[in-house]
Each structure stands twice: as C-alpha cells, then as structure tokens.
Amino acid sequence: MAYYTCLLLDADNTLLDFDAAERLALTDTLIRYELPHDEQALETYHRVNRQLWDRLAKGELNKNKLFAIRFGQYLKACGLPDNGKGREMNDYYEEQLSTHADVLPGALNALYELAEVATLAIVSNGAYSVQKPRIEASGVMPFIDGVYISEKVGASKPNPKIFDAALRDLGVTNRSRVLVVGDDLLADIRGGLNAGLDTCWVNFSNVENETGVEPKYTVDSFEALFRLVMEPEELENVGVRNRRHMND
C-alpha cells in the first residue's frame, strides 16, 4: 500500500500551466483595450496579481473584491488611467483565461501513475467559471476522483474547511495518509497545515521560500513526488502500462 492513499492537488502551476495561460489571456486583454502588452506590462500585472492573491490567502480581502480591484490596481501601477474599465477588463480576462487549459509537462503521466495507488482530487481557489472548463479540457479528469473549487465549497485555501469538505465527499477518514500537494505556500501549504494534513510544496522553479511557511516535503519534479507517495514495489511498476486505467 502507498505511503499516501489520497492526494489533494492544487490545479494551477501544480498540474495546469497557469503561467502560460495567464500570459496568453493577459496579452489578449491588453490588446483588446489598446494598452501596452510588452514584457514589462506582463511583469507588472504578475506582481500586482500575486500581491492580491497573497492578501486573499491572509484573509485581508475576498475573491469578489480581488476581481473588482485587480485591473484598477494594475493600471495604477502602470501609471495609466482606469476610466472605469477595471472590472470590465477583469471579466474579459477571466473569459479568455477559461479557454487555456495546457497542462505542465509530465503532469498527465504523473496522474496516470499516481492514480494507480491513490485517490486523487483537485482543490482549487480559482474562479469556478474559469477553473471548471480549464480542468475539464485539460485531460486530467480520467485520473481525478473529485474537483473542489472554493466558490462551490464555500471556503478558500488556506481555510481548512475546503480540505475537510473534500475528504468528507471522498469518504476518506484516515487523514494520516492524506497529502496536500501544491505550489502556493500561503494557500496550499498553509491550508494543509491548518487542516492537520501532511503537505508537499511543488517547487518546480526552485525558488526560495521566504514565507515562513514550512511544508513537510518539497519536490522539484513529479518523479520526486512518486518517491514520497509510493512504496518501493510500487515505484518498480512506474511506467508499466497494463494496470487499472488500461482496463477501464
């Protein structure tokens, strides 16, 4: 039996390539509103957006507020007038974002292998109207036993209620064999810790942890995640293509 028999996985930048989706959706939005869309503009947006999501994780604002002020703050940071278009721009951006469902390299193969030994579920803070179509179009669903998006659950990471709701729905009672896996220290990892669960920080870019939030594990590849989840005899079967999903 695997060391962990249930994985609660973040979506963006854990399974889905959010950085690529963000870049494409933002570029489309800035072009539509006849605004600069060079590298500096993209970096400024990324910085403003990251600060707002960190504030959400700290409980300093809710998601509706974030969406209402995000592009207004971005335009201000660029020294551009809002002209009352901030919320309209956000809605257009979210619409574009929902159409980009690229997965990270190796993610589908990783899910194939992990689904052989564990229950897999996605737990996401993203907007439901964006995340639902992206997740469904990404190709991950054959391996996923449940999808829990904060708007539908009624709680956002790092609130432990979103993890508790997922485990109840999945029928998982042995919390010692549950692993929370995600790239966001303030949301995913702190949320897992708040729920009393083991945590694994996905650090594919090898960035420095400056948050003070300490995960139980850190991995820089899906292969490293296999070694945390699987026992030696299960690791020996990685790559074998005649198991459960071949017979479904």
Image (cartoon, rainbow, N blue to C red):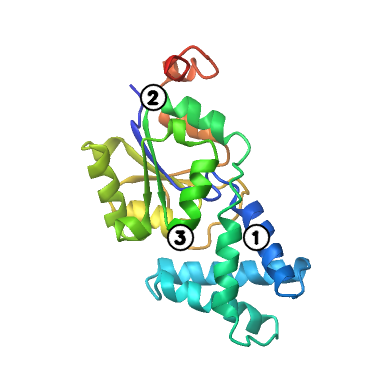
Residue 173 position within the rendered picture, expressed as x and y whole percent measured from the top left: 21, 37
Can residue 194 be seen by looking at this rendering? no
Secondary-structure class at tag 2:
loop
Residue 33 position within the rendered picture, expressed as x and y whole percent measured from the top left: 70, 74
The single residue placed furthest to the top in the displayed view is: 242
Of the numbered discs 3 and 1, the one sitting upstream in the chain is: 1
**Depth order, front residue of 101/56:** 101
Which quadrant of the view contains residue 98?
A: bottom right
Q: Is residue 153 left or right of residue 93?
A: left
Dot 2: few (<14), some (14–19), or many (≥20) neighbours within 10 Å? Answer: some
Residue indicated by mark 2:
117
Dot 1: few (<14), some (14–19), or many (≥20) neighbours within 10 Å? Answer: many
Secondary-structure class at tag 3:
loop
**Depth order, front residue of 30/204:** 30
Q: Is residue 226 left or right of residue 71?
A: left
Can residue 61 be seen by looking at this rendering? yes
Residue indicated by mark 1:
25
Give residue 149's mark.
none
Residue kind at label 3, given as amino acid type: Ala
**Depth order, front residue of 26/96:** 96
Q: Residue at x 39, y 72 (%)?
A: 62
**Depth order, front residue of 162/175:** 162
Give residue 127's mark.
3
Of the numbered discs 2 and 1, the one sitting upstream in the chain is: 1
Q: Is residue 139 left or right of residue 189?
A: right
Residue kind at label 1, given as amino acid type: Ala
Residue 215 position within the rendered picture, expressed as x and y whole percent measured from the top left: 42, 50
Q: Residue at x 42, y 18 (%)?
A: 248
